[in-house]
Image (spheres, helix red, strand yellow):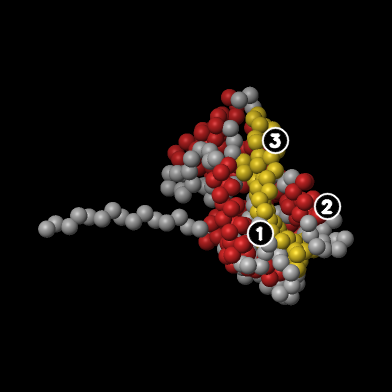
Amino acid sequence: MPQQSQPAPQPQPVPPHRARHTAESFGTDPQRYDRARPRYPDDLVARIVAGSPGPDVPDVLDVGCGTGIAARQFTAAGCTVLGVEPDARMAEFARARGLPVEVATFEAWEPAGRTFDAVIAAQSWHWVDPVAGAEKAARVLRPHGRLAVFGHVFEPPAEVAEPFAAAYRRAAPDSPFSGQPARRPLETYRAGYAKIADRIRETGRFGDPEQWRFDWQRSYTREEWLELLPTTGGLTRLRPEQLAAVLGAVGHAIDALGGRFTMRYTTLATTAVRTGAD
């Protein structure tokens, strides 16, 4: 009896923390990254600082600090900040602006007995092994210190997002990003932060995690948005001609809106306090 052929197994998506080529592609142009990427809500920074157990000058560890965008905000809020960053190019940029940075992935980084009042990860925790990262954060936090994982959700309006998605599919059909929908609901991102909370909870070394949300908006001109787009994960590894095709389509879409649009941002955070001395 002839056997029926079985469908070929579909390749499993690579977990973000194992996609090192993408994770370490942001340092291609650290100057643009630092110029274009948005800051974090001041209320978020203030809430983390106020909830730290430290003295007048809390010690903060910034995991995946990049060019130091979040670190500079925490420094301005009165903290002492140490960055850990796997990309030497990003680390060099941050150091040139006064941030001490040690080059390593968080998983491989050696704390050498140092502990901190807060461990933060701004738009970077998805590049960290979720289980090993939570365990290590617990080890380097002082009793009652806070782990805060946060990042922006930003989905442009459909008039911009849909031309972007179509142009991306044409320019880079083999990219794992090309199959993504033009816009994703906020609940998709909230589910991701809920999973982070689960991994933190599983360590048994934190109080019950909290979910924070900050809504805000910003107006972008055509030039400002085209400056930011190449710093995002789906575009950092495109060839110049692919990137030009995508940016051209998006530029035309923004022109059709009068040359600017309003982006609605949501900054999500999962945060938990380390339990007492063990």
Cβ–Cβ below 8 Å for labels 1 and 2?
no
Residue at image coords 71%, 54%: 67
> Residue at label 3?
218
> Residue at label 2?
76
Looking at the rendered structure, the secondary structure element under dot 1 is: loop
Q: How far apart are marks 3 and 2 (CA)?
A: 22 Å
Residue at image coords 68%, 56%: 271
Position in image of residue 106 (x %, y %): 64, 65
Looking at the rendered structure, the secondary structure element under dot 3 is: strand
Q: Quadrant of the N terminus?
A: bottom left
Above-or-below relation of 230 to 104: above
Say if residue 100 shows up in the picture: no
Above-or-below relation of 277 to 41: below
Mark 3 or 1: in front is 1
Residue at image coords 51%, 33%: 163
Residue that extends furthest to the right in the rendered view of this protein: 56
Position in image of residue 145 (x %, y %): 75, 63
> Residue at label 1?
208
